[in-house]
Amino acid sequence: MHTLRPMFLAGCALVLLSLAGCAKSAKDRERVSAASGYTPTLEDVAKAYNEACVGGGRESNNCAHYLADAFIRAGYTDLKTSKLITERCKCGAGRAVRSQDLLKWFQEKSLRFHQGRPEANSGFWAAYQEKPGDRHVTLIDTATGKFYGTADCKDWPVQWYYQW
Ligand SMILES: [Zn+2]
């Protein structure tokens, strides 16, 4: 069994590289991740992010919707059934749509918390950003300064970052 595992994981990576963004490959990858017990990295989630939901729908605000979709396609299948998610998208994929719900899910996973913008080259972080009357979630890569989400509200007063 042990000798099979590296080949199995390499196979997963090949599937992701060759079929990224394709709904069918997303379903395949969800199943593979659930079966292997592999924990995807936040970088895996960034690679999976494609500014869409596999259900094809759009909500009035898509930051949590599309980010949840990327987390799930990267392999975080627990997000599909988590009790922390109080509202899900209407397009059939059942993705989380509220930033506050994803915040609670980040906090459940978190191994490291950083208040304020994390320093450069400290890896990928799941971000919760808030200003009076508005909330946002995204993913940032501190090596490149890039974000993976609908926006990066880095000037809003609340800046909470999580890693695991
Ligand atoms: Zn959706």
Image (cartoon, rainbow, N blue to C red):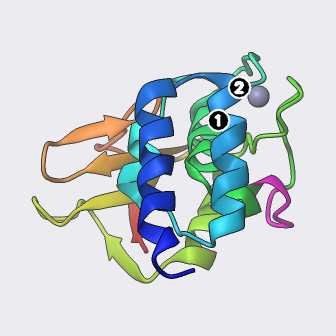
Q: Is mark 2 within 8 Å of ligand 1?
A: yes
Q: Position of residue 92 (x, y in %)?
A: 89, 28
Please tell me which residue lies in front, 133 or 138: 138
Q: Quarter of the image containing the C terminus?
A: bottom left
Indicate the position of residue 45 as horizontal and vertical percent values.
46, 48
Q: Residues within 10 Å of mark 2 (few under 14, many from 20)?
A: many
Q: Are marks 1 and 2 in contact (CB under 8 Å)?
A: yes
Q: Which residue is mark 2?
A: 54
* Quadrant holding the N terminus: bottom right
Q: Amino acid at mark 1?
A: Ala
Please provide the residue range marked out in magenta.
80-85
Q: Quadrant of residue 63?
A: top right
Quick check: 155 left or right of 17? left
Residue placed under numbered mark 1 in the picture: 26
Q: Is 17 situated above or below 139?
A: above
Which of the two marks, 1 or 2, is nearer to us in this view? 1
Secondary structure at badge 1 equals helix
In the image, ligand 1 is in what quadrant? top right
Q: Is residue 16 visible?
A: yes
Q: Secondary structure at mark 2?
A: loop
| 124 displayed left or right of 6 | left
